[in-house]
């Protein structure tokens, strides 16, 4: 199953739920549906964030196969962008942050002092 063609903006509700929010936006799921799967998939129930493999398992339970890519086309790609300590959506050169803001990707990375090679992208296998 592919990613959501239209992004419905969802914002964080807790301190460490950025991966829950990013998965919900990218997969076109509700926050609640993703959170329900997190509570039965992750030992800490997402309270301290989610590892990449946990995110992939949750997506699989929602009917999506995610592939991990480190070669990112910052102007064309669409997926869940994993930074060292955060998860957001990357779509066509824009970062949709889980606080509801939309940034130019270069400005976003610069603002967080994150290098592009410190990121990976989770994309739906179509």
Image (tube, helix red, strand yellow):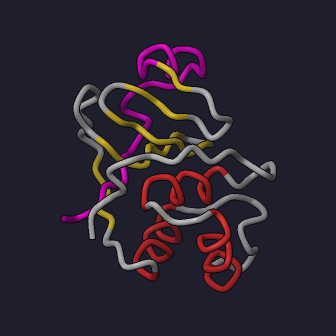
Viewer-closest of 4 and 120 = 4
Residue displayed at 74% across by 52% down = 16
Rendering quarter of residue 76: top left
Rendering quarter of residue 56: bottom left
- Residue 123: x %, y % from top left: 31, 55
Viewer-closest of 99 and 57 = 99
Residue 3, placed above or below residue 85: below
Number of residue marks: 0
Residue displayed at 75% across by 60% down = 48
The magenta stretch is 104-126
- Residue 88: x %, y % from top left: 52, 42
Residue 107, placed above or below residue 76: above
Quarter holding the C terminus is bottom left
Residue displayed at 27% across by 63% down = 2
Residue displayed at 32% across by 51% down = 5
Q: Residue furthest left?
A: 126
């Amino acid at each position: 199953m592919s990613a959501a063609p239209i992004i419905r903006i969802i914002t964080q509700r807790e301190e460490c739920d950025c991966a829950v929010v990013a998965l919900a936006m990218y997969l076109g799921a509700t926050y609640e549906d993703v959170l329900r799967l997190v509570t039965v998939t992750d030992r800490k129930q997402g309270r301290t964030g989610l590892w990449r493999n946990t995110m992939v398992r949750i997506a699989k339970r929602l009917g999506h196969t995610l592939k991990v890519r480190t070669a990112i086309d910052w102007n064309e790609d669409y997926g869940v962008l994993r930074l060292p300590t955060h998860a957001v959506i990357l779509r066509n050169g824009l970062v949709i942050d889980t606080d509801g803001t939309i940034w130019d990707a270069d400005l976003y990375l610069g603002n967080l002092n994150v290098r592009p090679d410190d990121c990976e992208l989770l994309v739906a296998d179509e």
